Amino acid sequence: MPSPVDLRVVAGADFEPLLGLPYREKGSDWAGVNCWGLAVLAYRLLASIELPTYAAAYGEIDAATRDDLARLIRHEALLWVPVEAGEERPLDLISLCVAGAESHIAVVIEPGRMLHVRRGGFSLTERYTTPAWCRRILGFYRHADLAAHV
């Protein structure tokens, strides 16, 4: 059984070390991350929770494999607790539609702000309440270990 998560630590989480990491296909460490790998690293650093990387489960991300990635995201979402919009908190994940597919994940750092990385860029924070992002939100999800705490 996983160790309990102290929500006081999660609420005061310092996301600063996760900013400016370069995008790296299938990356999930300090050398570089993709969007899911950034979530893996955030959970490892801030909540001592190990998430699977799924790096072996998909090829290079392009139009042909985007559906494979969308299936992985939908499968992973089944293992998480859906969160109503407006109830999100730090470390909840946001599933986003990019290029017409459910193919992007971001981490809530505080209500209204997310941490994410896109191909060719560096990890950064942005408001997910802007028109550019809010229309892409497919759902918010909380890890079961965090959902068990009020």
Image (spheres, rainbow, N blue to C red):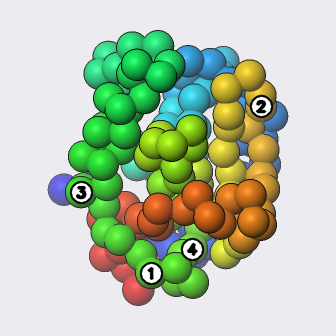
The residue at the point 78 percent across, 44 percent down is: 124
- Which percent across, then down, holds residue 108? 61, 62
> Does any portion of residue 62 appear in the rendered image?
yes
Residue 84: which numbered mark, if any?
1
Distance from disc 2 to disc 1, alpha carbons, whole Å, reads: 29 Å
Which residue type carries mark 2? Phe
Q: Is residue 33 above or below residue 3?
A: above
Query: Which badge, 1 or 4, comes first in the chain's sequence?
Result: 1
Query: Which badge, 3 or 2, comes first in the chain's sequence?
Result: 3
Cβ atoms at labels 1 and 3 below 8 Å apart: no
Residue designated by label 4: 89
Query: Which badge, 2 or 1, comes first in the chain's sequence?
Result: 1
Query: Which badge, 3 or 4, comes first in the chain's sequence?
Result: 3
Which residue type carries mark 1? Glu
Residue designated by label 2: 122
Q: Is residue 27 left or right of residue 129?
A: left
Cβ atoms at labels 3 and 4 below 8 Å apart: no
The residue at the point 77 percent across, 31 percent down is: 122
Distance from disc 4 to disc 2, alpha carbons, whole Å, reads: 23 Å
Quadrant position of the C terminus in the picture: bottom left
Counting the numbered discs, the total is 4
Q: Disc 2 on helix, strand or loop? A: loop
The answer to which image quadrant residue 81 occupies is bottom left
Which residue type carries mark 3? Leu
Q: Nearest the camera: 148 or 39?
A: 39
Distance from disc 1 to disc 4, alpha carbons, whole Å, reads: 11 Å
Residue 78: which numbered mark, if any?
3
| Mark 2 closeness class: few <14, some 14–19, many ≥20 residues within 10 Å | some
Q: Disc 1 on helix, strand or loop? A: loop
